[in-house]
Image (cartoon, rainbow, N blue to C red):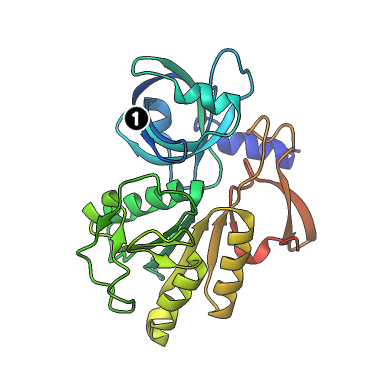
Amino acid sequence: MITAVQRKAQENRGTLFVEDGEVIATESFPGEQFVMRIRAPLCAQAAKPGNFVHISCHELRPMRRPMSIMRAKDDWIEILFKIVGDGLHLLSKKQPGDSVNVLGPIGRPFSPSSERPNILLIGGGVGIPPMVFVADDLRKRDGNWRPLAILGSEIPFPFDLVTSTIATPWLDAAIDKSMPLLESWGIPTRLATLAGFEGCYDGYVTELADQRLSALSAAELAGTEIFACGPTPMLRAVATLAANYDLPCQVSLEEYMACAVGGCAGCTVKIRTPDGPAMKRVCVDGPVFDATTVVWEA
């Protein structure tokens, strides 16, 4: 008899790769934040929005670091990271041409439904990358997808702010700053912060999202779904917001992890299942979960 673990291993067979990637470029932003593009063709061709990679930062630091994929195209992937600890500090020093070992793509991705083409993307801090990846994927899909992104940060955003030319009539016109990449794709985007950045909403991403949802008609809400990634308190608040509007919501959880392939069970979270609460691994059972199934700790 095939066990659940063996069945999961069979599902992942042929979709997980280990390759020596090559740093193509690194761009630095205030707050010790970096966007790195890595040539990793096997991973790039298999990656889906919500997947992540497990990266070896440096030969002096054997423990890998999990990184959400922000973009994947042709033979490269992009990651966004903020320096926390020696490993990521060493990774930030990598130069074009340097090697970075990449394990991925890993995890359960986001699953858009054609019945709900109004996708509200909510990303906070290092939870921004998966939302960018989803937006990139939706704009390339057939169908009338209408994503809208709300991104938040309490330190300078990891991109230059631009004034949006995409109208958001549900919002004060003074809230007009956007992410250049999403703006260039024609995807309406607004930014939230408590740090007082000009042109950004003064408050939490969930408050800004609430403004958007409250402006929708019943028919529009019936075609809306929320995707989110960010710190756990933010995701808990997003789950509550989605419940208030009776909207489906998928969240990408952030947890510390060691192996990232389901072996160590060090990244488990409590999830409601038909058979009762169970501990699920964020790395392979997630990172994307139905928000209603997550047992949010107080």
Say what amino acid the circle numbered 1 marks. Trp
Residue found 63% across the figure and 64% down from its top: 236
Residue 222 appears in view: no
Query: Quarter of the image containing the N terminus?
Result: top right
Residue 7 placement (x, y as % from top left): 66, 39
Q: Secondary structure at mark 1?
A: strand
Which quarter of the figure is the C terminus placed in?
bottom right
> In the rendered view, would you say 227 is above or below 160?
below
Residue at the (56%, 35%) spot, across then down: 12
For the residue pair 292 and 210, the one nearer the viewer reads as 210
Give coordinates of residue 210: x percent, y percent. Answer: 48, 76
Kindly indicate the quadrant of the structure image that contains residue 77.
top left
Image quarter for residue 75?
Answer: top left
Q: Is residue 54 visible?
A: yes
**Which residue in the structure is indicated by mark 1?**
76
| 244 left or right of 38 in image | right
Q: Residue at x 43, y 79 (%)?
A: 221
Up the image or down, 156 lies above or below 59; here it is below
Of 160 and 57, which appears nearest the observer? 160
Q: Nearer the viewer, residue 288 or 81?
A: 81
* Residue occupying the point 70% across, 41% down: 267
- x and y percent of residue 133 in the render? 39, 47
